[in-house]
Image (cartoon, rainbow, N blue to C red):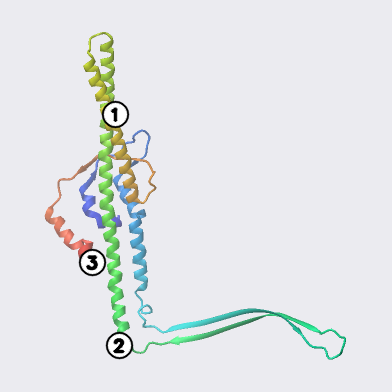
Amino acid sequence: MNHLKLTSLFVVIVVFCGLPRSMQAQQVLSLEEAINLTLASNYDIKIERYNQEVDANNVSRAVAGQMPTLDYNLNYEYGYSDSEIQTLSTNPGESNPTQELDGTAQTFSMSPELSVPLFTGFRNKYQYKQLEPTSKVSSQRVNQTMERAISATVSAYLEMARLQSQLGIDKELIAVSKDRYRRTQEDARFGSANSIRKLQAEVDLKTDSANYRNALLNYQNSRRDLNLQMGQPADMTYDVDENVRLTETLSYQQLLEEMEANNSSIKIS
């Protein structure tokens, strides 16, 4: 995958183990799918790609002012006149004759102007040289933005996986607390449990329920954060794959060499 060449550091860290499992018939989003969505739809990446296209189109001798330019000055006028002319009659007793004039007037003019740069003190030459590195820097900014977006996506994905796992644990704790509370109620009914045990079981059940609600809220917020990184609607729902492990075969020296050779911030500088 060509896009993932820029993110070898993150891809090598995460290893996928087995196929994603479905939870409650809800779609499971893998980390690779999340990265692909980020590369395709992340808003910051889209903006930088647009800027890169603009900078690439500006690398031309015409933009640098080295080519002749032909300008046209166009002028169009439209007018409407409505008048009434009254003349003085020379014959006594006759009314003064009147004449009404109305109509439109249109004028159109075009004047071309050709400009040919002869010598500008090498200003246009150096301006063209400045456009080329600007385009290269713009390309590196796209890579830099992609790397940052993927880093944020991986972090958001792992955080959501952690909270999803915690949510399952809290569900199990609630089930245990419910069972303990139900048993204390039965024991109290037959006189084999005191009120302290019953109150303690009730407190544990309420505590576990509150922890579950907090975990659920954090889980939903983490999914919104991941949707933001992927450029997806905030209310899009799915589960993530919890079967993610970190590899222990990374070489610090190798990572350092790859960073010095491929880091976008260093290349931009």
Between 183 and 26, the residue placed more toward the observer is 183
Quarter of the image for residue 240 reads: top left
Answer with left or right where residue 71 lies relative to residue 170.
Answer: right
Residue shown at 31%/74% (left/top)? Answer: 131
Q: State whether residue 185 is above or below residue 107.
A: above
Query: Label 2 belongs to which residue?
Result: 121
Quarter of the image for residue 209 reads: top left
Q: Which of the two labelled residues, at mark 2 and mark 1, occupies the earlier sequence position?
A: 2
Label 3 residue SS: helix
Quarter the C terminus occupies? bottom left
Query: Label 3 belongs to which residue?
Result: 268
Q: Which of the two labelled residues, at mark 2 and mark 3, occupies the earlier sequence position?
A: 2
Residue shown at 38%/87% (left/top)? Answer: 117
Quarter of the image for residue 17 reads: top left
- Tell me which amino acid carries mark 1: Ser
Quarter the N terminus occupies? bottom left
In the rendered image, residue 99, in percent from the top left (x then y), is placed at 77, 83
